[in-house]
Amino acid sequence: MSAHEATILAVDDTEVNVDILMGILKNYDVIPALSGKEALEIVKNEKIDLILLDIMMPEMDGYEVCRRLKSEEATRSIPIIFITAKTTESDIKEGFERGAVDYVTKPFNPIELISRVDTHLELRSYQLRLEERITQEIQKSRLKDQVLYQQSKQAAIGELLMHIAHQWKQPLSELSSINLNHLSQIVLQEELSKEGLREDFKKTEQILKFMSDTVETFQEFYKPNTQNSFFDVMDAIHQAIGIIDATYHYHKITLTIENEGNPKAYGNPNQYAQAILNLLTNAKDALLHLPAQAPRRVVVHVASREGKSIVSVSDSGGGMSEETLEKLFTPFVSSRQGAGIGLYMSRGIIERLGGSLGAQNSAEGAQFVVTL
């Protein structure tokens, strides 16, 4: 936007003054207004880039017009240059305090007026371009977050399938054993006892129920829920552990819970549990690089301080480098192996709930602290 493409609103209750302004600014697009009320109506219907506003007007003075413009989102960023016959320091100071960007005095000095108008139109142009750039960057950031969210969902599906596989490993083995036993009896033409069949059928029912309950647990955990409420922090932690405990058992990871009291928090319990699950998954990934004989430990410590719940997840994986710590919560960075999206998403979840997520090295490895 060049200065001469901009639209200027000239407000003065004296028609002669308006005519003088329009004469000096004849190369600009100037809209006249003879009262504060008329000026406010024009601003509603026209795109105004700069306002020349007389202070001393009847009914509604320039200060009140300025106050109303600055109180509205749509007009508060329009630069206002006060027109005044008063040149005392206190008058000028009051004008700036009311929200003006500059002032011009009566009688008008054409060179000074044009210079001030051009300066603030140029600044206005920079401001609009900056706002446009910020809007574009926000849109890019949102698009990036949408991509990361989709990648996070894909990673979560992979983790989900792995957890289900570990949950079902033992039940499927037991079912296979029962079937092989019956098959061998048939092949060897041995008599199948009714009591044995009854017991095996009962055991099969129990196994299938366990597998069905597992699916329901996973469905409940991943079910979308946007409702915030007060919830028991330990319940959310147990919900997350219920998803990953079989995977921990499979990898011979010892999980210990240290609970000081029973804190509650406000937010979305499912989202909170998802963030905790991501931290438990990250701890698991950090431990998988250890030698088979090395102890694999994860400690979840739960406490309450000054009305806030504080949950730490610590592992014995040896900790992180300073470089990793600095970049830890950026996309595609994890404490060890893995997609590196979970920690980024976890911090986003916790911050949206009004809390914080930090990381540090502890005596044995990494420690993540959730405060809510």
Image (cartoon, grey):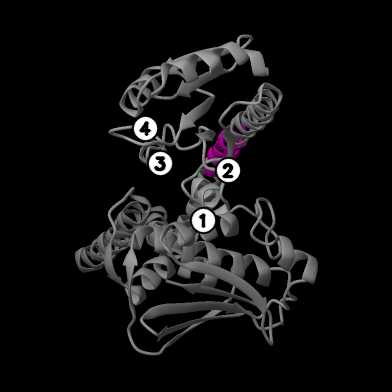
Q: Nearer the viewer, mark 3 or mark 1?
A: 3
Question: Which segment did they paint magenta?
Answer: 136-149
Quadrant position of the C terminus in the picture: bottom left
Which residue matches tag 1? 348
Residue at the extreme bottom: 260
Q: Residue at x 58, y 34 (%)?
A: 105
Residue nearest the viewer, comparing 177 with 130: 130
What's the CA distance linking mark 3 and mark 1? 43 Å
Main secondary structure type of the part rendered in magenta: helix
Q: What amino acid is labelled 4 in the image? A: Met
Could you tell me residue 254's position as x and y percent? 55, 81
Q: Amino acid at mark 1?
A: Gly
| Nearer mark to the viewer, of 1 and 2 | 1
- Which is more N-terminal, label 4 or label 3? 4
Asked if residue 36 lies in the magenta stretch, the reply is no
Q: CA distance from mark 1 to mark 2?
A: 12 Å
> SS for tag 4?
loop
